[in-house]
Image: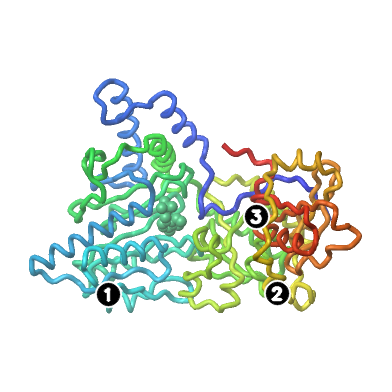
Amino acid sequence: MNTPSHFQAVYLDHNATTPVCDAARQAALTVMSDCFGNPSSTHSEGLVARQVLDQARAAARAALRVSQGNLIFGSGATEALHTAVFSALLHCRTQRQAGHATGRRLVYGATEHKAVEQALRHWNQHLGLHLDICALPVDHHGQHDLQVLAQWLPETALLCTMAANNETGVVSDLDGIEACLKANGQHTLWLVDGVQALGKLPLHLARRRVDYAAFSGHKLYAPKGVGLLYVRPGTPYTPLMVGGGQEAELRSGTENLPGIAAMGAVLQQLARAEVLTDLTVLAQRREQLLAALQACLGPVHLHAPLAISLPTTLNFSVPGLSSKTLMNWLDAAGIQVSAGSACSSSKGLGSPVLRAMGLSPQAQDGAVRLSFGPLTPQADIDRACQRLRDCSATVPLLPRDNPQTATEESAVCAAPSAPTQMQPPPCLTWPQLASYLQQHPQAVLVDVRDPYEVAAAGPLQVGAHTAVNWPWSTGCTQASNAIGNQRPLVVFCRSGGRSAEAAHHLAAQGWRQTVHIHGGLALRDRALP
Ligand code: PLP
């Protein structure tokens, strides 16, 4: 078993956000240093900035292959989705006020990003429409039920369907949906969330009768805070924000030019080919990762058929392991993935997407999403596979093999709750730790992660100190009298959550000089701005 304590982690959570690629970074830096003007200014600095903006829009037009219609830059996909929903619903209200019939339903795919459902609810309420908001069911593969759609469409004012799902990677049957719209929904407006598909699948916006399409820069190598809305010619549109009249009066507010230029640089690459990397190459990389996961973890339960999923996404579970256990272990092994979407994983909520697909509670509870990007180098895929091979001996044992893991989830719940009346133990940052250890050479480093995480990552060493492992999942029961309670304890874990609770508990047990590390191992040696 090879467990080096320092290895470079592989980031495989691209559906949450991607790193910024060189072309995008360079474009943003050039704008910030050399083309800092305001595109609305009429002096030459402003004209240069205007040119940057025009070039980015031209790149978007070429990348999306739409010669007509509006392409409006904004802050991201959430804004684009809201603008589309607001425009469609306002149009609906105007029609109704003029005595024209409109559908009484607003329909969204049951596995849409929650920004879609929330935008529908928000504007339906605030525009006083009170239409029926209906979740279009999906089958157990995650694809829309087109029979139900066909029944609902004659009464549907707005239909929202994503091109590809952020959690499972399932690709929607846009051709099938369009055929339904042609047959049954002539007057229905159609919004497509193209966030996860851009750069990975051809979207054919011009030949499809998509009315609105939303995109996000940070899902495709541009920075966060920039996005794009496509609006088909003749489709109802009302700006969400008015003011200085930027974006041809379609979206006011001084443009985020560094972000737009960065997104433009990526779109320029897409203008040459509709996908950033050949899809068969991406599918081979996914196969390679899947084979390495299976070799390491045993049977892996896939939650979406590979044939209808983005070739960059795997959503899976390992029977008997919770997603938290699996994620913690993969993270310790140096492979960064997520449990469900970034929004739901940070809140520890179950996945509405997997629930809508009818997955068993066990599969939902164990789901992990691994996603790479179309520009992820082969070397990163190889490194992730190598890490899996190196750490295979440290895989958390399944309950039938290991009574400790069997009770792990209940042990977490049963871990003594920290007393509430005590002052919380102080929290240190990593830079503060060095001087703390100088002042307290007797201090003991206490790693409260689970043993399989420590085994995968290797024991933590800070200077002359090597950490002891007292897992919080079993209540730090290893805390021993051998370490007298006069010795200071420095408690840490992966993210700072478990260590804060454990530190409180240990302080209450008599280790009065207990501190814990803010942000956990995730922040170690990380340069923050
Ligand atoms: N739609 C999908 C499918 C997404 O994955 C996301 C981001 O997670 C969004 C919309 C929201 O995008 P943004 O973060 O740009 O607002």
Residue for point 8% across, 69% down: 99
Residue 456's x, y, as percent? 76, 57
Instruction: Report the amino acid beneath label 1.
Output: Asp
Circle 3 or circle 1, nearest the eye: 3
**Residue for badge 2:** 414
**Residue for badge 3:** 495
Ligand 1 within 8 Å, label 1 CB: no
Circle 2 or circle 3, nearest the eye: 2
Residue for point 29% across, 45% down: 72
Instruction: Report the amino acid beneath label 3.
Output: Ser
**Residue for badge 1:** 132
Residue 172 against residue 356 in the figure, above or below: above
Q: CA distance from mark 1 to mark 2?
A: 43 Å
Q: Which mark is residue 62?
A: none
Q: Which quarter of the image is occupied by the C terminus?
A: top right
Circle 2 — which element?
helix
Q: Answer left or right for 238 relative to 264.
A: left
